[in-house]
Image (cartoon, rainbow, N blue to C red):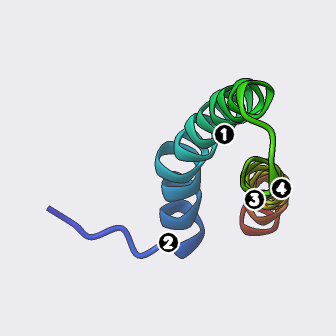
Amino acid sequence: YLADLNVSRIVGHFLDNRLMPRLAHAEERLSSMLQQARREQERSPGPGAEQRLNRIRALQKWQKRGSGLVPMILRWFRD
């Protein structure tokens, strides 16, 4: 066994095989959570329901930023 000391290959592998699938899964889960929160808000509107929606939307923004950042990092490491 020889250790792979190429940092760009190690980071690229991690981002491609570990982080990107998790970000994709998080996107699906957040969409599902948003739909559920909207249904709950329709059933019982109020400040708590609106706060949940706002928090989920904020998480979606962060998730989108992360998903957009990973390809840039991959390009940087591969160049």
Q: CA distance from mark 2 to mark 1?
A: 35 Å
Which mark sits nearer the N-terminus, 1 or 4? 1
Q: Are marks 3 and 4 in contact (CB under 8 Å)?
A: yes
Q: Which mark is residue 54?
A: 4
- Residue in front for this viewpoint, 26 or 13: 26
| Mark 1 neighbour density, 10 Å: few (under 14) some (14–19) many (20 or more) | some
Q: Nearer the viewer, mark 2 or mark 1?
A: 1
Q: Residue 41, image x and y in percent?
A: 77, 34
Q: What residue type is disc 4 on?
A: Asn
Q: Nearer the viewer, mark 3 or mark 1?
A: 3
| Mark 2 neighbour density, 10 Å: few (under 14) some (14–19) many (20 or more) | few
- Residue in front for this viewpoint, 50 or 65: 50
Residue 55 quadrant: bottom right
Q: Which mark is residue 55?
A: 3
Which mark sits nearer the N-terminus, 2 or 1? 2
* Residue projecting furthest to the left: 1
Q: Are marks 2 and 3 in contact (CB under 8 Å)?
A: no
Q: Secondary structure at mark 3?
A: helix
Q: Which mark is residue 6?
A: 2
Q: Residue 33, image x and y in percent?
A: 63, 35
